[in-house]
Amino acid sequence: MAIPAGDQERADALRELLHHHAHQYYVLDAPSIPDAEYDKLFRELQALEEKYPELLTPDSPTQRVGGAILEGFAKVRHQVAMLSIRTETDIEASGAQNFDLRVRRELGLKEGDPPVEYVAELKFDGLAMNLRYEDGRLVQAATRGDGEIGEDVTQNIRTVGQVPLKLHGKDIPPVLEVRGEVYMRRDDFEKLNELQREKIARGAKNEKTFVNPRNAAAGAVRQLDPAIARQRPLSFYAYGWGQIEGGPTFETHYELLQALKAWGLPVSERTVLANGADDLIAYHQAVGRDRDGLPFDIDGVVYKVNSLALQKQLGFVTREPRWAVAHKFPAQEQLTTVEAIDIYVGRTGKLTPVARLQPVFVGGVTVTNATLHNEDEARRKDVRVGDTVIVRRAGDVIPEVVSVVAEKRVPGAAQFTMPHTCPVCGSAAVREEGEADYRCTGGLFCGAQRKQAILHFAQRRALDVEGLGEKLVDQMVEAGVIRTLPDLYRLGLANLVALERMGEKSAQNLLAGLEQSKSTTLPRFLYGLGIRHVGESTARDLARHFGKLDAIMEAGVERLLEVPDVGPIVAESVHAFFQQPHNVEVIEQLRACGVHWEESEPVAQAPKPLTGKTVVLTGTLPTLSRDEAKEMLEAAGAKVAGSVSKKTDYVVAGAEAGSKLEKAQALGVAVLDEEGLRKLLAGAA
Ligand code: IVH
């Protein structure tokens, strides 16, 4: 059949495009389009090649299963090819039905025949991994690579806590290849990126944030430096197997998974048996509902025929099994455009750039805003008004702009610059050295901070003012009815009823709520003031230690440092707060309005446990930043020094610790890792 010129050109263009995006994704770890978009292009090419087989070239992206093979790792030829699975294109419940119908047809089942038994699993959004165990010991971990040849990443995978280095239990096959997914939990991903942002803020070169947990996991797995890989927390779930020699025989997929579990491999609790299409549909719906609450990303569910005999009978089409299918959920990443970049001002005056987006349906909800975090991030991603961007929303995490599609930039789009004044009150906004954020210096003069400060003060864990919500506070601050915290207690019925949409009944309820809130406790009051770095537990410690508010207000940094868990940053912040005359005034007025609590005698505290100890920090710790470690040590009374000497009591060493570690070893100074540090602090507490 002659190939129409248009189709020939389209196929060439698609191949080019897919090669480009695959390179961005696999080699540069910097995806340029969302997965769903890639899939769409991929399927278009696949369809063209199926229609005109002459179009097919050996180097077509459709001819390889996974990503490119990186230089730098030894190659591993898989004993059993690592295949992929077909994706059910119908996202609705009918996707499960379609699969069941296909399976039944292939198996020659009639309408009245019993339902087929399936296993339903989560489709983890990470990287496929082959773990080879010989005589129960992990001897090799390999990526999928192109399905035939993968990369030997054993060193990096050995650091994944959930991958057993040695199996336990009975009847372990002498050769057992376990297949599963290496992934990164969302909380680990957030922590890692927070750490990366801090490093960048401190001026670290060659550091970047990761676009999503899968990308971070891929980066960690293929990290050539195992010391760095170790700092990237990964997790693992088993869902299949490759070569198996010896050991018991199994009749079903489910039995085999149970055996893997018994031998010590993690198998998801959400891997279940399912009877026929109805169960698959119910599973798809239940998992869809729970998706946001899971601690990790999934991009769908997977259905597999349970009987291994039936699997064999069904066999494969090209490189995909007929007995399994992936049924996807709405993508967690989408393309949209940036309509504006606004600045959000938080309670502590922190300025956050936020991209206002053309509304887009991502991960099951419509998203209109996405955070750009801070100046460095916005600059590094180089997001500009008018840009086409990839937006990600997963779980309860705030939607974020992952990256810009450079090809789609409109000419003349201006680079984003962080304002040096607060957009709400016009006060100067400053960024202190070593800090990632700009802050408005307007304090309670700033309307945005005022609103947030009032909400913070009124919240349940602080003064607990019933009936005072965000909308009402916005309204009252904007109408000028309240400017400062004490104004809350000066509200009268007349002020309130004059507000829009405020009835007499709700006004009275609010007044009653305010009246009730006056009787409080010192920790609640302290916390409610919104002093930077003073959370609930620090407020409690301060209250216990000093007993009386006046004593806290008068305390110098030295005395504040005596409070357990209070380090120099917190002490400085508390001291600075009470030095401000307007803060003292607010407190006086609140008391004059009748806010009260019971004061007590100071509780004598044991001296700080690490008082007199000198500690040196060196290298990068797996989870704590240097500042965090320093603050924790100082809060426990230790002195943190810059160089190692005979007087040093401990050296806390992380990855890439250099000469300081050597010196400590030479001098016989105790060396701790992060865990040791935590133990020291815990034992000391
Ligand atoms: S089974 C022959 N089960 O999805 C069947 N895959 O193409 C091989 N994945 O890259 C795959 N969760 O890494 C299977 N429960 C699950 C899975 C799963 C995630 C990934 C796998 C592969 C892709 C399927």
Image (cartoon, rainbow, N blue to C red):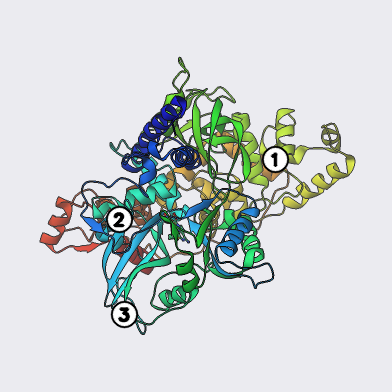
Q: Which mark is in front, 2 or 1?
A: 2
Quadrant of the image occupied by residue 55? top left
Residue 40: x and y, percent? 50, 39
Q: Which residue is mark 2?
A: 148
> Tag 3: residue type?
Gly
Q: Secondary structure at mark 1?
A: helix
Query: Residue visible at 50% across and 73% down?
Result: 307
Give the x, y percent position of residue 3: 44, 30
Check the image and name the residue furthest to the top.
Answer: 412
Q: Residue furthest right?
A: 504
Nearest the viewer among 437 and 128 is 128
Q: Earlier in the sequence, mark 2 or mark 3?
A: 2
User: Which residue, given by chain and number where applicable, does mark 1 sit on?
Assistant: 470
- Determine which of the numbered discs, if any, sits on residue 246 in the image: 3
Q: Residue at x 35, y 63 (%)?
A: 678
Q: Secondary structure at mark 2?
A: loop
Nearer to me, 16 or 479: 16
Note whether residue 414 is visible: yes
Mark 1 or mark 3: whose residue is earlier in sequence? 3
For this view, does 546 lie left or right of residue 631? right
User: Does residue 409 sit above or below 33 in this rendering?
Assistant: above
Above/below status of 154 relative to 530: below
Q: Quadrant of the N terminus?
A: top left
Q: Position of residue 72 (x, y in %)?
A: 20, 48
**Up/down of 247 relative to 386, above or below:** below
Whole-percent x and y of residue 257? 45, 73
Mark 2 and mark 3: Cα distance apart in space = 23 Å
Label 3 residue SS = loop
Characterize the local packing of mark 3: few (<14), some (14-19) or many (20 or more) Cα atoms within 10 angstroms.
Answer: few
